[in-house]
Structure formats: C-alpha cells, structure tokens
Amino acid sequence: MVDVAVVSFRLGGSDGVAIEATKWIGALRALGATVTTVAADGPVDVKVEGLGIRDTRPLNHRLLDAALDAEVVIVENLCSLPLNPTAAAAVAQLLAGRAAVLHHHDLPWQRPTTAGFAPPPDDPSWVHATINELSRRELEARGISATTIYNRFDPDPPRGDRRGTRAALGVGDEVLLVAQPTRALGRKRVDLGIACAEELGATYWLLGNAEDGYDEALADLVDAARCPVLLGTPSIPGWSMHDAYAACDVVVMPSDWEGFGNPVLESATHRKPLVLQRYPVALELEAFGFEWFGLDQLNELRRATSSDLEQRSEHNAAVARAHFSLDGLPPALADLVAPLGTSLGQPIHGAQR
C-alpha cells in the first residue's frame, strides 16, 4: 500500500483546486493508496500554520516535514502560483530529490498580478501535471516537461432538488433562472453574467462570494442591474451544487480566464445549456465537440425549442462521458506516478464514488 501526502494552501472547500484535489484523493484511495491531507485551512488530517494563501503566520517547518513524510507527495497549486512564496520554497526544499507530483491548476504568467514571477520549481525526481494543454505547452517552452490530466466529472450526477431550491430562493416555476456558479472576482466578469440575464429577461444567480476585495464592485453591479439578482446559496440541510444545477435553466460562464472552468463540464453532465465567453481553455475544451452558446448568441438560445436544447444537452453529455469521465482518473494517476517508481495498482471497483 502506497503512502501519499497531498498538500495545498487549503483543501476540502468549494474552490476549483480543492474540488479537484478531492477527486484525486478519491482516485488514489480507489487505487489502494493511503492518503494524508495537509494544508493551512480546511477539514484536513494535518493543519500546518503558515501554508495558507498570503499567510503571515510563521511556517511550522517541523510539522510540515513530518506531515510530508510519505512515499509520494502531491502538491496542489502551492508551488504553481506565488501566493505564499515562503511556503512554496519550504515545500520545494523538503521535496528535493524525493518522489513528488506538482499539480498545476494555474501558472504565474496566466494572471496579471503574478505575471512577473518565475516558473514553478523543478527537480529530476518530480513529475508535473497540468489541467490543460495550454499550460503544458507553456511549461514545456520554459524547460519543464508535464502531462495533461484534464479535470474529471461524474457523468451521471445526482439529479438535484429543483423545486426545493427554487422555493428557497423565492423563484417561481415561470421564472427563467440564469446561474453563474463562480466566485465574484474581476476576471469572472460578473458584469457580463448580469448582462446575459438582462438580455434573456431572466433572474441572475451568482453562487459564490466576493473575494480579493471585490465586494464594493459587486455591490455596484447589483445596484445597477436591470434584472433580479440573487447572491449566495440557500441554507438547506444537505444542499449541494447538484441542486443548483437542477434549479437553474441556463448556466453562464463569462470569465476572461479560467485554468479550466468546472461549470463548463458540469453544465454538460447536468444537461443544462451553457452560455460562455470563449476564454482560451474553453476553446481547447470546445474542440472535443461540445456545442455551447457564446455571449453573442443569445438570440439563438432564445429561438431554440425545448427539443433543440434537449438534443444539444444530450450531445454535450455524451462528449463529457467520452472524454472527461471520473472513471478515467485512477488509471491516469497510476500512469502519472509510474515514472517515480511507484506502482498504484488497479482501481478497486466502486471505491471512488
């Protein structure tokens, strides 16, 4: 049985890195590995002060060293973006010459605020994984070889509670509900999401919170909106994102940039029409054969019949199943760590779900 440690700024939350790390942890356990989770924040096995994003607390080096005493260490984005350079340097130093996987969700030059920083660290004993081909090629251009492992999804997610969620939101059956399942940040382009709902004559629903000082900008956008705006998620015991997708009629992803953008695939598995701004990685994903609406194609969406939308949704669900199914993650991870001299074996049937 292989002992694996997974380390990041935070784990177990609702941000994209944490969600994908949870999937990797499930896949590793399906392969028979024992997994220890390590982070500054979240429901983890070992909490290490000083590992968090922009953490000002002194780093507990002794605890970190003990927590990362594993056959393989997987670093989730902590060494990818310079959000805590002290912690990143400490982790890289601890892992020098040891079997490790650096899982890159974002890279410094892909964000204006970190564009001037150096590429992630590298070591002959490590392997690198990216969540898209664009990042893999950009790392390769900087002398770092990586493998692309796209984010994976359950092709048959729970149906969710449409009626209960809409009742909790105060949205009637007759209301067209456009959901943006993201946080509120500048690059998430909430303004375009609201504009989409306005043009469709819909209610706009932003699920995530404002971060990085975006609160005032979000308040201004809500005040100026020419459509009803809902913020946050309902307080219903056991409520999940499956219920959000069940409740909405259209998903909007107006971001300028996403390292992946999980809602684009979740809209497919939940069989909802998607309106998006075609950011670079969205174009990469669309090339698999998805049929999405652009922000400039709202008239086409309005004119589409129920039969048209159902046919498109079934097509997108089939593409997602063929190329992005969660069942393909365990063998992909087994192949990824094989060069490290680690054998994770075959998936244990049913262990990942």
Image (cartoon, rainbow, N blue to C red):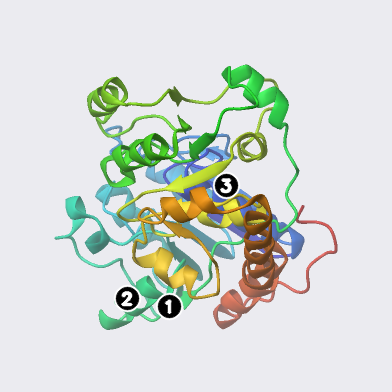
Q: Answer whether residue 98 is visible to the viewer in this image.
A: no
Pick whichever of labels 3 and 2 is earlier in the sequence: 3
- Rate crowding at label 3 as few (under 14), some (14 to 19) or many (20 or more) other CA atoms within 10 Å: many
In the depicted view, which residue is nearer to us: 42 or 107?
A: 107
**x, y percent for residue 141:** 27, 82
Left or right of residue 61: residue 328? right
Image quadrant where one finds the N terminus: bottom right
Q: Secondary structure at mark 1?
A: loop
Q: Give the residue displayed 40% in from the left and 29% down from the top.
A: 209
In the rendered structure, which amino acid carries the disc numbered 3?
Thr
Between 125 and 253, the one lying in front of the other is: 253
Residue appearing at x 34%, y 61% in the figure: 279
Q: Which residue is mark 3?
A: 37
Residue identified by numbered label 2: 139
According to the picture, the residue beneath numbered tag 1 turns out to be 146
Q: Look at label 2 and name its amino acid.
A: Leu
Task: Give the CA separation, mark 2 to mark 1.
Answer: 7 Å
- The answer to whether mark 2 and mark 1 are in CB contact below 8 A is yes
| Element class at badge 2 | helix
Q: Amino acid at mark 1?
A: Ala
